[in-house]
Image (cartoon, helix red, strand yellow):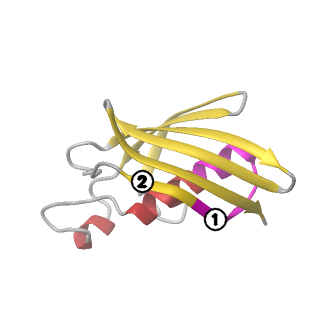
Amino acid sequence: MLLKDFYTISQLDVTDHIATAHITINKDHEVFKGHFPGNPVTPGVCMMQIIKELTQNVVNKTLFMESSSNVKFMAIINPEKTPDLVLTLNISEADTLIKVKNVTKFQDTVALKLNATFKPL
């Protein structure tokens, strides 16, 4: 985990090529002291890192993000109001690359959609 104690995984289910992760963002993490005091917002780069780490967990490989596309931040993830997230990862392997289509939600709200291509190290 790149950011120690930034989030916890409460559940991770993998069926075929679909992984569903239930995580909780730590509202007291030091990142939120600077992003932004009094109105915390989960940084998009941190969400991208979480997706990478969850994918690594599923495929059991260390990965490098080679590219991303269709990155859409659709709602603010405020860890004080909506710390519990569900990430759905559609993972496929082609040649030596691992492709992921992600949808991240809190409650019934889609917060993030992202397509990424990872290369094993």
Residue farthest top in this picture: 15
Identify which residue is drawn at 25% across, 73% down. Answer: 34
Amino acid tagged 2: Lys
Identify which residue is drawn at 34% across, 52% down. Answer: 26
Q: Secondary structure at mark 2?
A: strand
Is residue 42 left or right of 18 when viewed as pictured? left
Quarter of the image where the N terminus is located: bottom right
Is residue 103 left or right of 75 when viewed as pictured? right
Identify which residue is drawn at 39% across, 38% down. Answer: 105
Measured as percent of width and height from the top left, residue 45 is found at: 45, 65
Identify which residue is drawn at 36% across, 49% down. Answer: 25
Measured as percent of width and height from the top left, residue 48 is found at: 50, 59
Q: Which residue is mark 2?
A: 72
Quarter of the image where the C terminus is located: bottom right
Q: Which residues are magenta?
A: 53-68
Query: Which label sits on residue 67?
Result: 1
